[in-house]
Image (cartoon, helix red, strand yellow):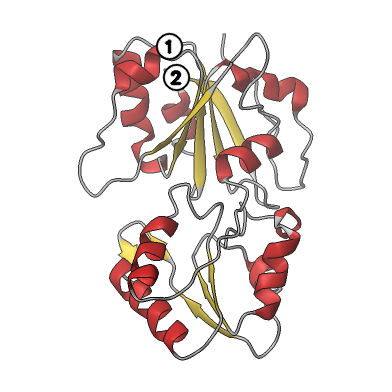
Amino acid sequence: MGAGPGDPDLMTVKALRCIQQSDVIVYDRLVSDEIIALIPFGKKHIFVGKAKDKHSVSQADINCILVEEAKKGKTVCRLKGGDVFVFGRGGEEMQVLHREGISVDVVPGITAASGCTSYAGIPLTHRGVSQGCTFVTAHSEHDLEVNWSALASLNQTLVFYMGLSKLEFICHELLAAGLSATTPVAVIEKGCTSDQRVFIKTLSDIHAYIANKGVQSPALIVVGHVVSLAYELDWFVVQSQEHIEKLSA
């Protein structure tokens, strides 16, 4: 089940019903505290969150937990941040469960690229600005296998998941592939939550700009001219949110 990007109001009605009707909730680090608070009292819940270089539970162990709980006759809700099939490893877990003869339903969730950009006033597509968007995971156990030249030539919105620690590398590769140094870039920290912050600069200076801002994961990187629309379309205001600064001349 996809829990969405953080705001509990963005969960679907079906998702909430699944939480209420399940016997066991197995949840990730990116599931917000507000959503965890919706779990009815007395339900068994198991935290299997992962953070960079701090994997509390391996994927193999998560698979075993899901299989073991289901084979006890329990209805298990595998609760994931965002959407289960967008860099969420939901497909891998389903394959394991199916091999064990366990039936699985899927409840889609709003993925971070859609939810967080909307809360930042950045449309993924906009007539006359961008006619498409591409999602890229910057998380890899080894080197990123990305065709940077192809990405740079798309002339559309690029959204990088799990890329905060690789921001400088991503910008360098896109510049080397021919993307203009003045291309707008946004880093959206903790999108769709009361702690959301949005930082906007250009491809050539975004990394240096946020270096001393204390930006933490989860953070989404958005590259493309749609980012400039945030000044006009910004609507989600929270007390802790910094004002979006204008792009450098």
Is disc 2 surrounded by few (<14), some (14 to 19) or many (20+) residues within 10 Å? many
Q: Amino acid at mark 1?
A: Ala
Task: Tell me: 185 left or right of 64.
Answer: right
Q: Nearer the viewer, residue 17 or 116?
A: 17
**From where the camera sits, is residue 46 visible?**
yes
Q: Residue at x 39, y 71 (%)?
A: 97
Q: Residue at x 62, y 45 (%)?
A: 191
**From where the camera sits, is residue 215 visible?**
no
Q: Position of residue 70 (x, y in %)?
A: 46, 83
Residue 131 quadrant: top right
On-image quarter of the C terminus: top right
- Determine whether the residue tagged by mark 1 lies in a helix, strand or loop: loop
Q: Position of residue 222 (x, y in %)?
A: 52, 29
Task: Tell me: 98 left or right of 124.
Answer: left
Q: Amino acid at mark 2?
A: Leu
Task: Tell me: 232 left or right of 143.
Answer: right
Residue 116 quadrant: top right
Query: Which residue was labeled with disc 1?
Result: 181
Q: Residue furthest front?
A: 101
Spatial CA span between label 1 and label 2: 5 Å
Q: Position of residue 103 (x, y in %)?
A: 48, 72
Q: Position of residue 7 (x, y in %)?
A: 70, 55
Establish if 249 lies above or below 69: above
Establish if 227 lies above or below 73: above
Establish if 26 lies above or below 235: below
Query: Which residue was labeled with disc 2?
Result: 203
Check contact, mark 1 vs mark 2: CB within 8 A: yes
On-image quarter of the N terminus: bottom right
